[in-house]
Amino acid sequence: MKRTAIRISAAVVLAMVLLSCGRGGNRAADGEKAVMRYAQYLSITGCGSYSVAEITNPWDTARILHRYILVPEGNAMPADLPQGTLIRTPIDHIIVYSSVHASIIDALGETDRITGVCEPEYMTCKAVLDGVAGGCITDCGSSVSPSVERIADAGGQVIIASPFQNSNYGAAGKLGIPIIEAADYMENLPLGRTEWIRLFGLLLGCPDRADSLFLEAETEYNCIRDTVSRHIEDNGGDSHRPTLLAERKYGASWDVPGGGSYMARMYSDAGADYIFSGNTSAANVNMSFESVLSKGIDADIWVLKYWSPQPMTYASLEAEYRLYSEFRAFRQQHIFGCNTYSSTYYDDIVLHPAWILEDLAAVFHPDLFPGREARYFKPL
């Protein structure tokens, strides 16, 4: 099927979904939780004049990591608010730690609400970079140890950060500024990460726009996934799935995506037989080179990400570690690399997971997308 046909089909399905769901998608009715289709660690409950957003602790799912009480400006403050962090919405001055979350805000058309960022050298959003260069957005330093003085100077009303197990955010956590613990990266479904845009929509006062973007991403992703699935069924079933090795070693170990992770699901949806799919971890799994070699020496295809001003080559990969040449994918030159230095991969995998899915599917099944130019994963 041609790429254009897929796009037309996705547009038709999206129109049907929007008509059936109405303008607000699956927004929470008063007193009811919104039905999260994919996100496991986020719930949103409408409570009349305010909303409650709960973040489940990804490392202890029986506990709540954080509860936020979102009360729109202009609404009277309810007398019976539940326990949680109170936030008046929409937020006008936001400090953002990661490029991913800055890009979500930009996609919602609210970049002018960002007044401070950490590590702008890793930001990919042009509006943010222009803001930093022009002095409208403050460089708050390292996300590990940001400058509390600069956060204060930027007038930060909230900080949006990615939580880690047992993290306390250092001095920034003692400023009294609410920290939105965006645990989207811990979701184990690609669209689970995308669905967190609905929380950003509430924080920024544009829930309809957020719902629309999510429905569009969902429709496009599922259309490509189903196209790949039909292609595999029409060509002998699972035997038509190439075996897949992912990533490469750093230092003494090799972190591979766990079989229960969103990347493992994306590999499967793109039509590959991922060699570590039997592992149940939703996080990366630390393995020795010998273990990966034993399992993946005969893998058909190898995909990896790297960060470099120059494209990776087989010679530069072998120079990193001579034994990489033992893999059949190396010997047969079936390695595809994504250079995150020159691409927006990390932002797009949240906002546009279908783009990454299609890119991978074109690697695993090139006959399905003839003539398609790779966006992320390109042959070494």
Image: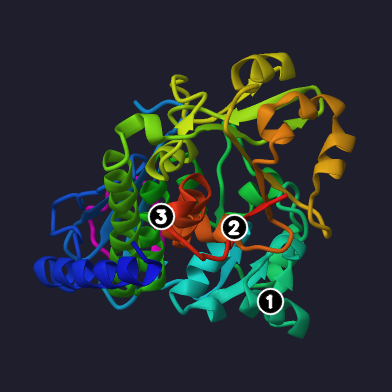
Residue at the farthest bottom position: 134
Q: Residue furthest right?
A: 319
> Three-letter amino acid code at disc 1?
Ile
Q: CA distance from mark 2 to mark 3?
A: 22 Å
**Segment tinted magenta in the rendering:** 77-87
Q: What residue is disc 3 on? A: 368
Q: Amino acid at mark 3?
A: Leu
Q: Earlier in the sequence, mark 2 or mark 1?
A: 1
| Main SS, magenta residues | loop
| Residue at figure coordinates x 49%, y 30% from the top left | 274
Is 133 located above or below residue 102 in the figure? below
Name the residue tied to disc 1.
137
Is the residue under label 3 in contact with that under label 2 (CB below 8 Å)? no
Name the spot of residue 303 as percent of width and height, x first: 62, 41
Occupied quadrant, residue 224: bottom left
Q: Which residue is mark 2?
A: 345
